[in-house]
Amino acid sequence: MKLFVDTGNLKEVEALAALGILDGATTNPSLLAKEGGDARQILRQICRLVQGPVSAEVVATDTAGMLREGRELAAIDEHIVIKVPFTKDGVRACKALASEGHRVNVTLVFSAAQAWLAAKVGAAYVSPFVGRLDDIGATGMDLARQIVDIFQRGRYATELLVASVRHPIHIIEAARMGADVATAPAAVIEQCFRHPLTDIGLERFLKDWEKAQAARV
Ligand code: G3P
């Protein structure tokens, strides 16, 4: 399973890219608005750091506007994936952009029917927001599982990109069910590194080694 970071923060992307664990990145208008500055410039730099798919979202809500913005975003860098919201206008825009050869990520997906429709119009990725479903008392990962099933049985080329990830368990469940990608905030990726027994174990190894060295002199 591929790992994307869900951020507009260059320092976060830089640190994770340096670890060699990043396959791509996702952004959204909220994440980029938080950073301030020139969004196009930020996106260009994320692409340079990641050297993989970087989702950049349109803010237009009509098909014509989405097409115009989508083409402008795609011109920023070859790694840009155009992100459109799941609406009827978004579905129309996805179909048109995909037929021009652009990769499209259909976002704000909250049902299996929406994911299936996005796949039918040639989305490269669909992004179910599992955390936001959990937030309202549903089980987000149940939706992800339904989408895996639909895409596998229907042999759709669309990739399932599990989004709105809140903790490492979301990532592990996504990997176990055969999702193509999980996108997570840097803080959640950081949590994946941690285990107290690793720290305790390393401390003990080093102490034992030092003791043995001291006994030799
Ligand atoms: O980028 C889309 C998605 O991952 C947003 O997540 O945490 O705002 O629900 P969140």
Image (tube, grey):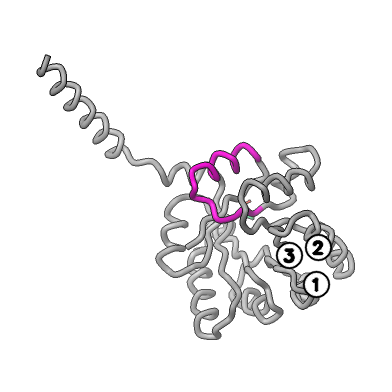
Nearest to N terminus: mark 2 or mark 1: 2
Q: Is residue 216 above or below residue 191?
A: above
Q: From the Cβ of disc 2, is ligand 1 less than 8 Å away?
A: no
**Circle 1 crowding by C-alpha within 10 Å: few under 14, some 14–19, many from 20:** many
Distance between mark 3 and mark 2 Cα atoms = 12 Å
Q: Nearer the viewer, mark 3 or mark 2?
A: 2
Residue 132 at x, y percent in the picture: 59, 57
Q: Secondary structure at mark 1?
A: helix
Q: Which mark is residue 85?
A: 3
**Circle 2 crowding by C-alpha within 10 Å: few under 14, some 14–19, many from 20:** many
Tell me the residue at 59%/75% (across/down). 112
- The count of marks equals 3
Q: Nearer the viewer, mark 2 or mark 1?
A: 2
Q: Is residue 198 magenta?
A: no
Residue furthest to the front in view is 217
Report which residue position mark 1 lands on. Answer: 93
Nearest to N terminus: mark 3 or mark 2: 2
Q: Is residue 148 above or below residue 205?
A: below
Residue stretch rendered in magenta on the structure = 10-26
Q: Are marks 2 and 1 in contact (CB under 8 Å)?
A: yes
